[in-house]
Amino acid sequence: MVRGVEKKINLYKSVTCEHCRGEGGEPGSKRSTCSTCKGEGSVRTTRRSFFGNFSQVIECPECLGEGKLFEKKCRECGGDGKVKKEKEISVKVPAGISSGQTLSLDLEGEAGPKGSVPGNLYVNIRVSEHKKFSRRGNDILSKEMIPFSLAVLGGKTEIDTIGDKVILKIPTGTQSGDTFRLRGDGVPDLHGRGAGNHLIEVVVETPKKVSREQKKLLEELKNQGM
């Protein structure tokens, strides 16, 4: 999500018949006037009801509104101009996209009738959760455990970012819950307007077990009011 990615997906869908190029007729076959609609492309139907007879003009079911028919239908698609098959599609997911957003891929939808322009494919995006990082707007959030001594005395510690490991400077007297900011190391704006920040919340780690020497030193600190 942060860097962007290209995914390959396989779809079983209607595609334009390659044998007849979507026309529906066997290559070389001649076209003749449809005997059902007499070349009009439409037919009139009459229905009886309680209120009387109703006439309606509909698309010719034989030639599908074209007014002409091939003498021989395509042996691959049976005259539909399209066949069902699996197709691999490349989807370029831009950096900064969010879960629930949708990508539109032009002309990658179902093939239209008789070689007409295919529809579009709409891909709904779901971003998988990360075990360490979370997102708030265009900011990346994470937590880092630091030892008590580092919080008191200050120093440097190596932390993970969405890219490489970096060195974070911890000032003297850092408290648990303090947050540090790495400018521009967050999520790129989807529209190219810079990037967010990486916000690191430090958590001061309290040791569960201490050695005899460590305990002695802590007792001395305690006696000094620390």
Image (cartoon, helix red, strand yellow):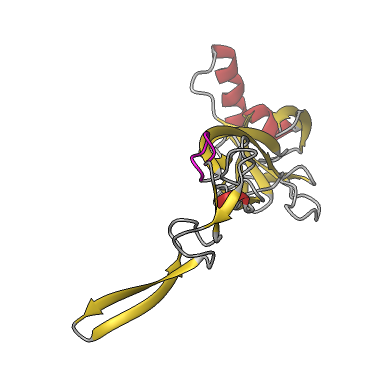
Main secondary structure along the magenta-highlighted residues: loop
Q: Is residue 211 above or below residue 75?
A: above
Residue at far top of view: 212
Q: Which residue is at the front of the view, 206 or 13?
A: 13
> Is residue 213 in sight in this rendering?
yes
Residue shown at the point (69%, 47%) measured from the top left: 96
Residue 92 drawn in magenta:
no
The picture places residue 12, in percent across and down from the top left corner, at 50, 36
Spot the residue most to the bottom.
Answer: 51
Position of residue 162 relative to residue 180, above or below, is above
Question: Where in the figure is residue 19, as x and y percent of width and height?
Answer: 61, 35
Q: Is residue 46 left or right of residue 117?
A: left
Range covered by the magenta-colored residues: 73-79
Q: Tell whether 25 sits left or right of 95.
A: left
Of 200 and 129, the residue lying toward us: 129
Image spot of residue 53 (x, y percent):
27, 82
Q: Nearer the viewer, residue 98 or 220?
A: 98
Q: Quadrant of the C terminus?
A: top right
Q: Is residue 216 left or right of residue 54?
A: right
State the image coordinates of residue 167 (x, y, percent, origin top left): 79, 30
The quadrant in which the N terminus is found is top right
